[in-house]
Image (cartoon, coloured by chain):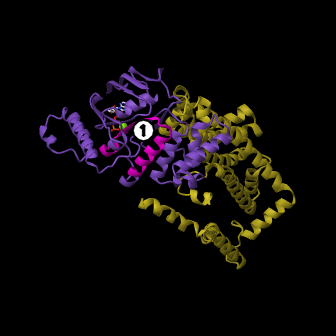
Chain colours: A purple, B yellow
Amino acid sequence: MLALDRVGKTYPNGVHALERFSANIKLGEIVAIIGGSGCGKSTLLRAIAGLDRATTGTVTLDDIAITAPHAKIGIIFQEPRLLPWLSVADNIGFGLSELSAAARREKVARALDRVGLADKANAWPRELSGGQAQRVAIARALVPQPEVLLLDEPFSALDAFTRRDLQDHLLDLWNDTRPTLMLVTHDVDEAVVLADRVLVMRPRPGRLFEEIKVNLARPRDRNSPHFDNFKRRVLTALDRSLDRNVPDADAKSTTGEAMWW
Amino acid sequence: MAMTVELPALERTDATTPETKASSARLRRYAGPALGLLLPVGLALAWEIAVWAGLSNGRLVPPPTKIFATMVELAKSGELSRHIIATLSRVASGFILGVVAGTLFGAISGYWGLARRLLDPTVQALRAIPSIAWVPLFILWLGIFETSKIALIAVGVFFPVYLGVMGAILSVDRKIVEVGRTFRLSGPAMIRRILLPAVLPAYVVALRVGLGLGWMFVVAAEFMGASEGLGYLLIDGQQLGKPAQIVAAIVIFAILGKTTDWLIEIATAPLLRWQDAFGGKSGAA
Ligand SMILES: Nc1ncnc2c1ncn2[C@@H]1O[C@H](COP(=O)(O)OP(=O)(O)OP(=O)(O)O)[C@@H](O)[C@H]1O
Ligand SMILES: [Mg+2]
């Protein structure tokens, strides 16, 4: 279990980015984090990944305190961040340097197959499309079989079609080993399609505002009324999370469908 | 879904035309240099004809055949290879020294902030001194023979390599370093698997700039008194009024400079095939 206990972060420049964020996330659970820009979502994820240290509170995974990157925690960023000097296959195998070459090759081949890029094994990252590159990044993060996979707006740079494709694909991959997924997104659709639980955050300082359980069976039908219902609930929560800091109440009248955050 | 169907189709059109592509690429690869040769060869030919037709006596600017004859003559007597070897070995020693020192100091300054604040201002101040200004001091310290010449060349090579290495390390993308951190690379592994490959393209450029300066400074070094070397041929040609010898030495400098630069390019090309650069295509093909 991933336990976040009153995690807070104040940056050296005095920005109070995150305050007393607590949550317990079970193994295999998919959690989406959603909230206005600058409400500390990336800060939270980086603290869980061990890339930055929280200034207060603790992150523990199965009773191990996380203060530095850990083998059981993988992270995928908004950009694929592939290493341009390694082939696609070598990029995927980057985290497997402890394995023998043969074992590594086999795992990489399986992962390539799994993300549908077997024919790109020897390509350079520059020869991939944005969606393909992000698939490679997903494969690279999943191939060491982490218990927790963190995703910081992984699909936000992609077009709507590719994004849907990759969302389904991610669920597919998740089904293989059922790791915990923690996904930051700005896309309400994405949150409701993927998550068991949506955590809505509010800004200044960033903290947990509301938690919405999405108990819909998978695979989820994006056009069903239930789906719409959950979307609306998340949207209202989002609106409220932002409105507290907006003195002008008229801004509330729009339904929030524009998703300007 | 429509896109995933279309993509392989696009690739197939790419794959069906390799022969036609290759032949046109080959043509372009040879046509490029040939085009570049047009102007110098044309000028040389025009000059040759002008001298041959008696429009000029060609005493101060000797025609190509005369220059070629001078080279052959020098080569026959074994003089030429002696001078070339002398110059080449000076450039090589100075280059190696400068590259080793430049890489070392550049890496320390780039990797370690404290060292940079300590070291870099001094290096930058030294860089502001025109390197030729060191000549008298080097002669006093190291004598007029090889050591002072090699030192001068090494100084010339040092600065671009130092700057190149330091700048390259400082500009390594933090986002890619973070990838290394999430996979918990140790310090040495981070250097070997992330920093070195990231720095390599800029390093190759620094080496080539350094080599160019090495060739520049070998001439200066050989002007300050040498009994052999291409620079000596230049001075000798001036003092004895042999313009053909001067031009011959210049042409040989050009050939050697271009060849050594090309050697660096060839040697490093396989390591840089991944680059997504404007000129990178021909190397990858
Ligand atoms: N390295 C940093 N140093 C100082 N302040 C920072 C740093 N990184 C982020 N911040 C600040 O912390 C706050 C939260 O930033 P964070 O990146 O976590 O937001 P976010 O929720 O991910 O926003 P977005 O949705 O736009 O990505 C912001 O006010 C930001 O300016
Ligand atoms: Mg963010």
- Residue in view at x 69 percent, y 65 percent: B60
Horizontal relation, residue B89 to residue B254: left or right: right
Count up the numbered dots.
Answer: 1
Is residue A105 visible from the viewing direction of this image?
yes
Horizontal relation, residue A247 to residue A111: left or right: left
For the stretch drawn in magenta, the main secondary structure is helix
The residue closer to the viewer here, B147 or B263, is B263
Disc 1 within 8 angstroms of ligand 2 (CB): no
Residue that badge 1 annotates? A151
- Judge whether residue B173 is colored magenta: no
Above or below for A79 versus A197: below
In percent of width and height, residue B148 lies at 72, 37
Kind of residue indicated by mark 1: Leu
In percent of width and height, residue B163 lies at 56, 39
The residue closer to the viewer here, B76 or B159, is B159
- Tell me the SS state at disc 1: strand
